[in-house]
Amino acid sequence: MKNQTYLWVLVGIFLMLTQTGVVISYNGRPTVTQGQHADLTCELIETDEELIQISWQKSTRGYRANHNFFIITPTYGPSHVKGRGDRVGFIGNTTALVGSIRLGDVSLTDEGVYTCIFTVFPSGPYMTEIHLNVQIPPVISVAVETPPVVAEGQESILATCTAANAKPPAEVTVEHGQCKTTTESDNLNQHYT
């Protein structure tokens, strides 16, 4: 029984010593504007083990369940899971253990958590998470009411300023003489008058 305990301790120490790889993400929380591309970078360092594959998983606004969407192998190169991914390209280097990808034409549904997984032999997988944030610029419009409004004998011009569909929320500032008003929306569809 005592020899069996020593054996398990030795196996545990061996496993800890063989797992020397460290995944590094250069941009753990990138922020991009809708319509631009997003580079998600990750690299495996401090290992000389054989790379089996690099897998990318995601859990986004568009699809909450974490799932594989892109795989890269040293032999066959990049491949899209289930044929999806015409907006995803490999910009890394398997020889240098760089698993970076580029997402093109990013939309709000792409916002979420992306997981880069390096599978090496013999120690197994190493992973890191990258949280992608997508910003949306506001759609801004200004409308002036005609004819002017008359109240208490005073003629006033009424203007409506709209900053809609922004993420993060738009901030609208209206100045008139010494009076200044600033308002911030708390959702993606807020209008101000």
Image (cartoon, rainbow, N blue to C red):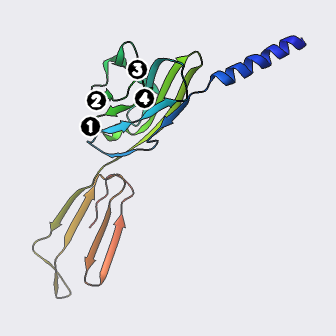
Q: Nearer the viewer, mark 3 or mark 1?
A: 3
Kindly state the secondary structure of the residue where label 2 is placed.
loop
The first of marks 3 and 1 along the sequence is 3
Residue holding disc 1:
105
Q: Mark 2 points at which residue?
A: 87
Whether the residues at callouts 4 and 1 have beta carbons within 8 Å, the answer is no
Q: What amino acid does circle 2 point to?
A: Arg
- Residue count near mark 3 (Cα–Cα under 10 Å), binned few <14, some 14–19, many ≥20: many
Q: What residue type is labelled 1?
A: Asp
Which callout, 3 or 4, points at the residue further toward the start of the chain? Answer: 3
Q: In this view, does 121 lie above or below 98?
A: above
Residue 169 in which image quadrant = bottom left
Disc 4 on helix, strand or loop? loop
Residue name at image x 78 percent, y 16 percent: 8
Rendering coords of residue 56 (x, y %): 43, 26
Mark closer to the chain start, 3 or 2: 3
Q: Position of residue 85 (x, y in %)?
A: 31, 25
Secondary structure type for disc 1: loop
In front: 168, or 98? 98
Q: Where residue 143 appears, x then y in whole percent?
A: 16, 65
Q: Do the residues labelled 1 and 2 touch (CB within 8 Å)?
A: yes
The alpha-carbon separation of the residues under discs 3 and 2 comes to 14 Å
Q: Which amino acid does label 3 sit on?
A: Ile
Q: In which quarter of the image is residue 149?
A: bottom left
Using the image as rendered, state which of residue 138 and residue 152 is in the foreground.
138
Mark number for residue 71? 3
* x, y percent for residue 66: 47, 28
| Residue denoted by label 4 | 98
Farthest-out residue, bottom: 153
Judged left or right of residue 147, residue 24 is right
